[in-house]
């Protein structure tokens, strides 16, 4: 339940920030906002303030802004209609949501980098079994603890770069005293690690090894401090890298859908994002803020893609109309946007199917 709650709050907040950008830009441009909704219909309660309906809706997944004439209808003659305002104002309104998400993402990344450092994904060995009577049973470790480093006793600890490397270390130090850096299972993701040491067996025992633990590979965030002057550049660098990755992944995702192949591992839908949200939330506030920043930038990158039903697709229409000085037929726009939405829903359903399949 905690995972679902955190996921809904996070997604709702990011979508609301996006829609708030459209809302503010429309108000500044003099475009009539017919409704600003929290959540999606059916409507629970609403008030009308200065010609705009502010509504609270049942489905808690963000919100929406409904503008007068945003569907391109030529029936609206009002100068407050979106379709009748200058093209540069239309473009500004469409880009405002993306801009808000980008700014929020940059702020969150900068905050994390300033308070905690730059998160790096490191390899760990999560303990699944501790054999009674083995050397591991005498150490101050527990199930679900994670081994993050190792060394011969008296030497400097080194990070784990691969499972094979750790296994080779154990094999080459039979009978020796060794030490391990351990991240306790109760750790909040902020580096509260301990160091334990013990004596390895002089020979391997069948199915137990020289240490007496069973483990699986896992990953965790470790923070690397950087100077305050480096924070803005690092935030911009990571934002640019993420936007490039989104553009490449979407193209690959569409090709995979057409081939009916498996969704790439780096792509997640609502179910996958909910799982990641729950896992990151348990890591602590730092990783959660970092993930929220990445998600906000991802939302901006996806929305600006030049595809029907997205802000980027609507921006293409505005640019075409500005260059041709002719308005595209409203019915054609509605049909194209409807087809684009159907395709996006199919794409979302397909990604969700693979998200669910990864649970089993």
Image (cartoon, rainbow, N blue to C red):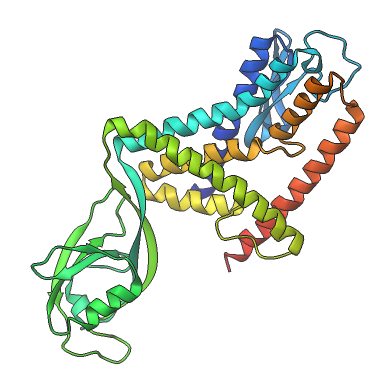
Residue 255 location in percent, x, y? 71, 57
Q: Residue at x 74, y 64 (%)?
A: 260
Q: Is residue 98 above or below residue 211?
A: above
* Quadrant in which the C terminus appears: bottom right
* Total numbered labels placed on residues in the image: 0
Above or below: residue 108 compared with residue 160: above
Q: Residue 245: horizontal and vertical position, in percent?
A: 55, 48
Q: Is residue 340 left or right of residue 162?
A: right
- Seen at 65% across and 22% down, the residue is 22
- Residue visible at 26% across and 35% down in the picture: 227
Residue 140 at least partly seen: no
Of 202 and 317, the residue lying toward us = 317
Percent across and percent down for residue 25 are 63, 16
180 sits to left or right of 90: left
Can residue 309 be seen here? The reply is yes
> On the image, which quarter does residue 68 sit in?
top right
* Residue occupying the far front of the picture: 323
Residue 321 located left or right of residue 190: right
Residue 120, horizontal then vertical, whole percent: 35, 51
Q: In the rendered view, would you say 315 is above or below 205?
A: above
Q: Answer above or below: position of 321 versus 48.
A: below
Where residue 310 sits, quadrant-wise, is top right
Name the residue at the left extreme. Answer: 154
């Amino acid at each position: 339940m905690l995972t679902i709650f955190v996921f809904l709050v996070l997604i709702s907040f990011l979508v609301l920030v996006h829609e708030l950008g459209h809302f503010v830009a429309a108000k500044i441009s003099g475009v009539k906002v017919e409704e600003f909704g929290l959540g999606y219909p059916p409507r629970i309660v609403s008030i009308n303030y200065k010609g705009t309906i502010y509504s609270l809706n049942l489905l808690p997944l963000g919100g929406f802004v409904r503008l007068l004439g945003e569907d391109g209808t030529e029936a609206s003659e009002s100068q407050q209609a979106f379709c009748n305002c200058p093209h540069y104002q239309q473009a500004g309104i469409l880009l405002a949501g993306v801009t808000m998400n980008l700014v929020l993402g940059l702020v969150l990344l900068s905050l994390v980098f300033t308070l905690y450092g730059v998160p790096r994904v490191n390899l760990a060995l999560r303990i699944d079994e501790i054999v009674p009577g083995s050397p591991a049973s005498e150490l101050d470790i527990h199930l679900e603890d994670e081994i993050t480093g190792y060394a011969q006793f008296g030497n400097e600890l080194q990070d784990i770069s691969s499972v094979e490397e750790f296994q080779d270390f154990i094999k080459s130090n039979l009978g020796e005293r060794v030490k391990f850096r351990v991240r306790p299972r109760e750790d909040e993701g902020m580096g509260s690690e301990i160091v334990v040491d013990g004596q390895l067996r002089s020979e391997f025992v069948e199915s137990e090894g020289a240490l007496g633990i069973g483990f699986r590979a896992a990953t965790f965030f470790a923070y690397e401090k950087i100077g305050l002057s480096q924070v803005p550049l690092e935030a911009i660098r990571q934002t640019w890298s993420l936007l490039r990755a989104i553009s490449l992944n979407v193209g690959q995702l569409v090709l995979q859908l057409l081939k009916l192949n498996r969704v790439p591992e780096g792509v997640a839908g609502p179910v996958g994002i909910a799982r990641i949200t729950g896992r990151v939330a348990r890591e602590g506030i730092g990783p959660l803020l970092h993930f929220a920043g990445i998600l906000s930038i991802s939302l901006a990158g996806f929305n600006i893609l030049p595809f029907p039903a997205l802000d980027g697709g609507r921006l293409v229409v505005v640019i075409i109309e500005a260059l041709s000085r002719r308005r595209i037929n409203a019915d054609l726009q509605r049909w194209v946007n409807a087809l684009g939405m159907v395709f996006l829903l199919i794409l979302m359903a397909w990604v969700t199917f693979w998200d669910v399949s990864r649970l089993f």
